[in-house]
Image (cartoon, rainbow, N blue to C red):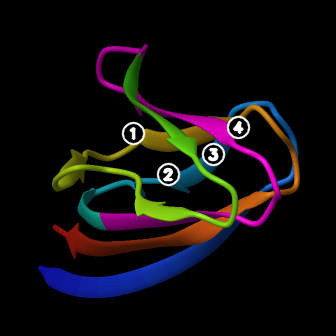
């Protein structure tokens, strides 16, 4: 079993749902933070989702309004993903939301 800490940057270039991270096969992931920032001069609504591959169901996780030039940790606590699960975000405005997701991959 290997534990690998990772960071991955993201930019929401559309207002469509965007896959931020997909958990690899034979892996469990612990997402610690999703640092998210708004570079625009207006408020932007952002919605987070988790697609649970074992149930083939998507769940809304969080709704936040990021203020102009504001930033937040998008998730309020630790988030666990199983193999095939996907963490997604969408924003009400394209090309202004970006960030970094920090996580631990546990391979088995």
Which residue carries the number 3 mark?
A: 19
Which residue carries the number 4 mark?
A: 91
The answer to whether residue 50 is magenta is: yes
Q: Residues within 10 Å of mark 2 (few under 14, many from 20)?
A: some
Q: Position of residue 25 (x, y in %)?
A: 37, 54
> Which residue is at 16% across, 67% downward?
108
Q: Is the magenta stretch mostly helix, strand or loop?
A: strand
Look at discs 2 and 4 and give the one toward the viewer: 4
Left or right, 8 with respect to 5, comes to right
Which residue carries the number 1 mark?
A: 85
Helix, strand or loop at mark 4: strand
Label 3 to label 2, Cα distance in Å?
A: 7 Å
Q: Which of marks 2 and 4 is nearer the N terminus?
A: 2
Q: Give the range drawn in magenta.
A: 33-58
Q: Earlier in the sequence, mark 4 or mark 3?
A: 3
> Which numbered disc covers residue 22?
2
> Which residue is at 70% across, 37% downward?
91
Q: Are marks 4 and 1 in contact (CB under 8 Å)?
A: no
Helix, strand or loop at mark 2: strand
Left or right, 54 with respect to 87, comes to left
Label 1 to label 3, Cα distance in Å?
A: 10 Å
Whether 66 is drawn above or below 46: the answer is: below
């Amino acid at each position: 079993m290997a534990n690998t800490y990772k960071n991955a940057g993201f930019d929401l270039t559309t207002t469509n749902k965007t896959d931020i991270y997909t958990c690899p096969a034979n892996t469990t992931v612990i997402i610690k933070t999703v640092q998210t920032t708004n570079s625009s001069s207006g408020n932007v609504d952002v919605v987070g989702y988790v697609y649970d591959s074992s149930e083939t169901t998507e769940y809304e996780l969080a709704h936040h309004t990021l203020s102009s030039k504001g930033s937040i940790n998008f998730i309020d606590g630790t988030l666990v993903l199983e193999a095939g699960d996907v963490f997604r975000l969408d924003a009400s405005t394209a090309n202004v939301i970006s960030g970094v997701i920090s996580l631990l991959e546990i391979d088995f």
